[in-house]
Image: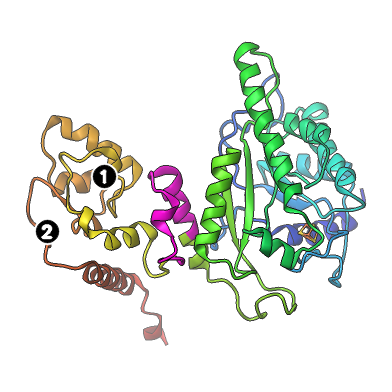
Amino acid sequence: MNADRITEKLSILADAAKYDVSCASSGSKRKNENKGLGNASNGICHSYTEDGRCVSLLKILLTNYCIYDCAYCVSRKGNDIQRAAFTVQEVVDLTINFYRRNYIEGLFLSSGIFKDADFTMERLVQVAKKLRTEHKFNGYIHLKSIPGASDELMREAGLYADRLSVNLEMPTEEGLKLLAPDKNRQDMIDPMQFLKDEIILRKEEKKLFKKAPLFAPAGQSTQVIVGATPETDQQVLQSANYFYQNFNLKRVYYSGYVPVLADKRLPALNTSVPMVRENRLYQADWLMRFYGFNVNEIVNQGQPLLDLDIDPKLSWAIRNMQAFPIDINKADLQLILRVPGIGVQSAQKIVSARKFGKLNWDQLKKIGVSVNRARYFVTCNSPEFERRDLTGNNIKQFILAESQSKYLKNKPNQLNLF
Ligand code: SF4
C-alpha cells in the first residue's frame, strides 16, 4: 500500500463524505461471537461535532467520481474537483487498521456512482463481505444503498451491514426533478420497499430458526437535504412522516444544505441554512416518533414553518392553551407528554411516582421536570409558581427572556479581559 497515496485519497474521500449526516450507529444487535473483531451490540457509541454531526465511524466515500450531475452535490460530474477512488481492499485495510488503533468503532461507507448502480453497489457489498467473512469484523457497518441497484445486491448488502440507507435527497419529487433531473424518485422508493419487506421476512425467519442470519439489524434510514429547494418545514416533515409510516424507517436525517456550488437553481453561496432549522426539524421529528404528535399538529397550512425562537412542543402548547392546565396527578401519560419541560422519561416517572401520593413542585423537580417551563401548563399539589393570567404569547416572551438571562449569566465576560 502506498501510504502517501492512501492518505491523499483518505483526505479527499473523507472530506466528500462529510455532507452526508446519516451516520448514527444506534440500534444494532450484532454480537461478537467466535473471538471476532469488534462488537456493535455495545461499546459502539457515536460522538458528535459541535454542529451535531457524527464522527465516531470511519466515514468515507468509496469514490467521488460520479456519472450524475445533481446540482446540490459537491461530487457532481460537472464540478471541477480533485477525484479519487479506493479499491475494495484499501477500504477493508483502512477499517481494520483504524479499528485496531481504536480510532473508530465502525464504518460508514457511501459512494459516488461510477459506471452504474450495480457496479458501484457490488463494490460496497464486497467491502462489507470481506470485513465480516475474512476479518470476522463485528463492528458497526452502515452502507449506503445505491438507488437502482439490483435486489440481489441489496439482499447481500443486508446480510453484512448493520444499517442500510437510501438517500431521498430532496423532500419532494418536484425538488428532485429541479436539482437532479437525471434521477428518479421511484429508484429510491423501490429499494426502500425491498428492504422493508426483507427486514420483516428475515425477522419472522429468525423467530422460527435461531440460526437464520441477521439482516440489516439496525434497519434502514434516509437523509433529506433541507434548504436547497424552497420546501417548507411542513413539506419536509410530511414527507418524513410518509416514509416513517410506509417504510418502517428507523431515522430520517435532516441535512441543512451547505452552499458549495454556484448554480442559478440553488440558493446563493452566502446563504447557508441556519443550524437552528435543522435542530427544530429534529425536535419535531422526535415529537412525531416518541411523543404521540401527529405531523399536522406541529406544522400545517396555517403554520407551515417551525418557530425558530422556541422548540416545536412549546410552540404547539402556546397555540393550544385551551388544552391546559392539566392536573399532573390525574392526567394520562399521553397528555403529560405534551407538557413543555417534561420529557418521555420524566412523564413515565410521574405516572409511577404518583401512585404513592400526590406530587408537588419539589418532587417534580427531582423527577427531572423543567419547572420553569412546565409551571405555565400544569397544576400539582402545591400552588406556588402557578400563573393563570398569561396568554400564550406572554408565556413565550417570559420563557425567551428567562433563557436569554440564563445565557447572559453563564456567558464568560471576555471583553473585560482586554
Ligand atoms: S448521484 Fe450522489 S454522488 Fe452523484 S452527484 Fe448525485 S448526490 Fe452526488
Is label 2 in a helix, a strand or a loop?
loop
Q: Residue at x 69, y 75 (%)?
A: 266
Q: Residue furthest bottom?
A: 418
Question: Number of numbered discs present?
Answer: 2
Q: Residue at x 88, y 63 (%)?
A: 83
Whether residue 416 appears in this view of the structure is yes
Q: Which residue is mark 1?
A: 336
Neighbor class of circle 2 (other Cα within 10 Å; few <14, some 14-19, many 20+) is some
Q: Position of residue 327 (x, y in %)?
A: 15, 45
Task: Write down the quadrant of residue 258 in the picture.
Answer: bottom right
Q: Residue at x 71, y 61 (%)?
A: 176
Q: Earlier in the sequence, mark 2 or mark 1?
A: 1
Question: Label 1 sits on what residue type?
Answer: Ile
Is label 1 in a helix, a strand or a loop?
helix
Question: Label 2 sits on what residue type?
Answer: Glu
Q: CA distance from mark 2 to mark 1?
A: 17 Å
User: What is the magenta range?
Assistant: 281-305
Q: Residue at x 64, y 48 (%)?
A: 222
Query: Does residue 249 appear to the left or right of 99 in the view shown?
Result: left
Q: Nearer the viewer, mark 2 or mark 1?
A: 1
Query: Does residue 394 appear to the left or right of 81 in the view shown?
Result: left
Q: Which residue is mark 2?
A: 386
Q: Position of residue 24 (x, y in %)?
A: 59, 46
